[in-house]
Image (cartoon, coloured by chain):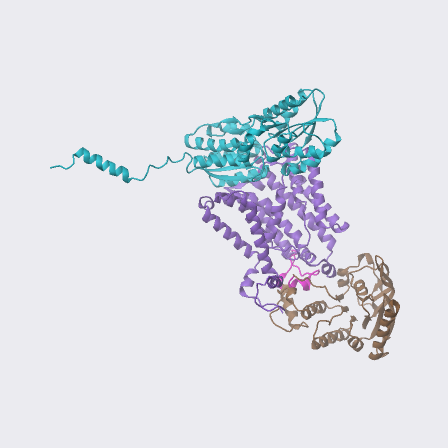
Amino acid sequence: MTSSFQHIVRLEKVDMTFGRVQALTQVDFEVGRNEIVGLIGDNGAGKSTLIKIVSGVQRPTAGNVYVRDRRLDLEDYSVRTAHDLKIETVHQGQTLGEKQPLWRNLFVGRQIVDRFGFIDVKKEKEIANQLLLKAIGFRGHGITADSTVRDLSGGERQGIAIARAMYFKADLIVLDEPTTALAVNEVRKVLAFVEGVKTAGGSCIYIEHNLAHVHEIADRLVVLDRGRTVLQFAKGEITLTELTQHMISLHEGHAHASA
Amino acid sequence: MRARDSWLRRILRVEGLPITFVLLLLVVAFMIASPDVFLGYFIYMSFLTSVPPLLILAVGLTLVIAAGEIDLSFPSIMALSGWLLGYSVHELHSPWIGLALALLGGAIVGLVNGVLIARVGIPSIIATLATQFLWGGLTTAFSEGVSYSLGSVDETFVWSLFVGRIGPFPVSALWALAVAVAMWLVLNRRRFGEHLLFIGDNARVAEVVGVNVAREKIRMFVLMGVLAAFASVLLTLENKNFFNTQGSGYLLDVMAAVFIGGTSVFGGQASVVGTIAGSFIISMVDAGLVATGVQGYWVRAAVGAVFLAAVVGNMAIQDPERWESIRRRLGLTRSAPR
Amino acid sequence: MKLFSSSTLAAAIAAVAFLATPPAQADEKLGAGITMYFQMGGNPGDGSTLPRTNGARAAAAALGVSLKEQYSGWQPETMLKQFRDAMAASPGCIEIMGHPGNDAFASLVADAEKRNIVITSGNSPLTKLKDEYTATGFGYAGVDLYEGGKLTAQKMIEYGNLKKGDKALEYGLRAQAERGKSDQGLYDTLKAAGLDVDYIEISPEVDHDSSLAVPILTAYIQKHPDLKAIGTQHGNVTAFIGKALQDSGKKPGEVIVGGIDLSPATIEGLKKGYISVTLDQQLYLQGFLPVLQCVLSKKYGFAGLSTNTGAGVVTPKSIGALVPLIDKGIR
């Protein structure tokens, strides 16, 4: 039943505290039904923490999380449940087992099993090899489903992580710095992929340091600073130059504060 | 830029192949040095009798190390389960109850280990070292230091089922093989095993991809406990005796068997086949050297040498980048530094 | 004309033949061609194992026996494993020790006997099996454990003038079926003389690595300042009692100590006077005699001989004469 909902995911007054560090304070954040939201902010602003809450890795210290307008039982919310709710995440940094082959990395946590509970290795490898042909970031030959992640370059690793998210066809895709190790033409492919998600009816949270990219494709921009949402802009509301100025002054604001 | 896979490297990557080759070399060497012993079948039957407990422990430990943990408590599980079995046979006259109690005992020790490590957060090396003392001490206390003879247990069905003979061939070897095959399947073809590999590779990554790290760790330690208990059952039945000190001698041999077999101490990479070969190597070295006439003083040194060579060799095969950087640092390579 | 008479010729031929043959071969050694697997007991070179090893090696060299040494660190299950390995090599003889007990060895020894391997024993007896297989050469070269403990206690009492009501500690392995008899002998004898005897069991850790006994003993000594005597029948533990006494601030002779064997530390203890009497097992004989037994039984079918190798005790007075032999690893 495709219910009509307003926001695919919504955070309401979310706090995240780690010991004495307050990573997020009273954050209200939502992603619409068919919307690309660009999430930007300085290092340490809390972007990755916010993403971890959305993707089920982290449980907030306080506040509520709504998926498709239904409040989640946070005790129950894990990465698995997020996947079941059709939320896929490409985290920044470590999302792949270095010493494990690609076919395991693609399916870990949701393996294809036969009726006895044994992993269908043949099928997983088949699908993996197919994905490799279309995956972003694969420039050379010699990589197969059996290759170990350790043998891959940074760009290839990112390609795998993105391919994984693509394969599992989510309604919400979260991308945390997906283009850092990619070449120019590959970046284009990622941006095209993000737009494609929107065309297919889904939503996307997109985190990037490169303001030009975010500015280009985002329907809405949310700026996070020291754990709080401070600014929001709709598409067209602000030019790239103005956006850059805002970010710089925010950064200098910190410099002044600590001076 | 990764190196192209040479055909040699690809052969070497077949699971357990290099160390099995070393095992065969060793057997051939012993055959040459001591043909009267190693060309007959008796000595191999003797090995097949003594390998099973070692092999079962080593295979269990392989999974634990694959997950990036360690378990030092299994010698005490050997003692505890052996005592439960011995007591049941001696006092209650029921080997079946003994078997059940022994396995249950192992499972409980494993569960305690798992909870301490996965929920309380104590590093496994400390937690299992502590439980080794705890359970070993409790066993000595309850048994008052006494060893039990299992009397005529060799006339029971339990005995024939687990450690009987088919001709000269020990049935316990078949059990050990079955356990090894089962554990290979678990590690390589079951979700649980794959989760262990990812946990050992990088626990953060495992969490992020949806593995319930704490739950899988607890399961793994319980499994190790049950395997250790089973190993103890085989040992105790075979000896027809529960010795109060049993198990303590296995600690280092089991670890040597695992690492000689090629399982990485860093976790995430494990070889059950390698462990099987490693277990045979460890079992054979003592008897082989003695038969060859090498004095007893040299046995440990020989095992140490094999161990080191195996670990270095395995590193060269599995982790070529690390190997390359070591060679460069030692000045053993002619290529220019990157 | 004959140049040489036939007898002269015969003599000449005989002389040449005699001179031409190679010098008479030494008599082939009695045990030539016999292989013997020998359980030495502890770890290579340790105090209670080395003299035994030397004795066995000397006998093997003298008799031409091929000796295969096995070391089990005193672990019974290792001894069983090594016995199986030995059997698999089908040697002429195997020497075993009693630690695993008669029951554990019974079927293994039966198999070996069926295959005509001579089995004999040393250090720790296997009385039941020995009686069963005496005819095929099953002997024993070791101390009569109970008597040994008893003797040690008697000498302790004599040497230290111990009286009724004196406090003593027996630190031993009573839980082990056969081996514990020596501790029982010591304990019973002290008790019978009216002493107030306390008992502590040696833990597996201490059994394996006896330096760990020092803190245990030191604690006990400090807790019982009026302790007059300590007795043990564990060779490696004996070596460390002197240190424990020293660490506790006791002067030599304040506490009467009875032990066993002559490891270097025990000898030091004797010389300094910390150790009062130590039972000499004559470990060398426990190595030498089983090899001899093997050859005699294998070649000529002689029955197993039981020899009590306990000579009596060594005291600070008698140690001097023995030191040169000890240095050579003979005593």
**Quadrant of the drawing holding the N terminus of chain A:** bottom right
Q: Quadrant of residue C185?
A: top right
Vertical placement of A107 versus B273: above or below? below
Vertical placement of A250 versus B181: above or below? below
Where does the image place residue A53, in percent across and percent down from the top left? 81, 62
Based on the picture, tell me whether residue A118 belongs to the magenta stretch: yes
Based on the picture, tell me whether residue B195 belongs to the magenta stretch: no
Vertical placement of A28 versus B94: above or below? below
Where does the image place residue B212, in percent across and percent down from the top left? 74, 56
Where does the image place residue B86, in percent across and percent down from the top left? 64, 35
Q: Colour of chain C?
A: cyan
Q: Quadrant of residue B191?
A: bottom right
Q: Quadrant of residue B241?
A: top right
Q: Colour of chain B?
A: purple
- State which region is magenta: A100-122
Residue closest to the eye, B5 or B219: B5
Where does the image place residue C204, in percent across and percent down from the top left? 65, 37
Residue closest to the eye, B90 or B83: B83
Please say whether residue C117 is visible from this viewpoint. no
Query: Which chain is tinted brown?
Result: A
Main SS of the magenta part reads: loop
Residue closest to the eye, A5 or B170: B170
Number of numbered discs visible in the structure rendering: 0
